[in-house]
Image: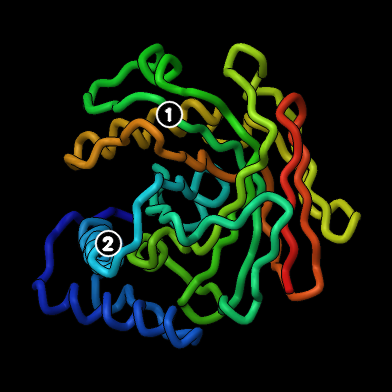
Amino acid sequence: MSMRVSKIADASVSLVANELQQAEGQRRQIPPVVGRLGEGNVVAAYEVQAELMRRRLASGSRLVGRKIGLTSAAVQQQLGVNEPDFGALFADMEIEHGGSVDSSSLIQPRIEAEVALVLDRDLERQGTTMAELMRAVAFAAPALEIVDSRIADWKISIVDTIADNGSSARFVLGTSIRKLTDIDLLTCGMAMTRNGNVVSVGSGAACLGHPLKAALWLVRKLAENGEPVRAGDVILTGALGPMVGASAGEVYEARISDLGSVKVSFT
């Protein structure tokens, strides 16, 4: 699939943003929006995402980081793309480690385990190097991302998920943190359990080859867009293993070797 990079009318952007915003607020599924934005039109999809971010900031929400999606080669192939995507993380999306999320506040949630990076300096250059990124990472932490598509039955294209803020909903950071010098993010193994039973396994290599490689892609892309990452930002680097559906009454815990564990309950 060729990715189109054409802008669309502001009215169309606003219309699609309205639909997604209302779907999230009313906790209901809507048909795919790709028909209105154009198949493969990732530029239009990011325009919708940006409009939704502007509205959220205007309502008092606080931007605290970004999430990276589509870091699996298999998922990229499935959606016909050759690079990841990203979405915004807001303070009111965070759930405390060991806390709970109300399932009725979501539509069709799924969950995945990731490595989170927290920065201690801005990275504004489009040509940011790997060395500059590693120097800017204050620490890594185990994380869970709860994704939730507003698109009916998760029948999404790349355009749908980008417009829908990367299908993001909530995130959880573990409280065990490590310096990059103390862990090997390439070979670290991950096991995620549901009520004590393993439901997803993976490793750092599953995340675009290395979580730092995914993070560097994001840093450069945001700098190119004029929205660079800032000191204090959280970066969810992408799934280490398959995501799974989540429902009320379930407890999820992910353990990442050398990094620790992170836990959340669905009520």
Q: Is residue 23 above or below residue 158?
A: below
Q: Could you tell me residue 117's position as x and y percent?
A: 51, 32
Whether residue 41 appears in this view of the structure is: no
Residue shown at 22% from the left, 63% from the top: 54
Type of residue at label 2?
Leu
Residue shown at 10% from the left, 72% from the top: 10
Residue shown at 59% from the left, 18% from the top: 179
* Mark 1 surroundings: few (<14), some (14-19) or many (≥20) residues within 10 A: many
Identify the residue under disc 2: 57
Q: Is residue 230 above or below residue 197?
A: above
Between the residue at mark 1 and the residue at mark 2, the CA separation in whole angstroms equals: 21 Å
Identify the residue under disc 1: 119
Dot 1 lies on which element? strand
Q: Quadrant of residue 51?
A: bottom left
Q: Quadrant of residue 13?
A: bottom left
Q: Could you tell me residue 225's position as x and y percent?
A: 19, 42
Dot 2 lies on which element? helix
Q: Quadrant of the C terminus?
A: bottom right
Q: Quadrant of the N terminus?
A: bottom left
Q: How is the image coloured?
A: rainbow
Farthest residue in the right direction?
Answer: 196
Q: Are marks 1 and 2 in contact (CB under 8 Å)?
A: no
Q: Could you tell me residue 63's position as x and y percent?
A: 35, 51
Residue shown at 39% from the left, 28% from the top: 216
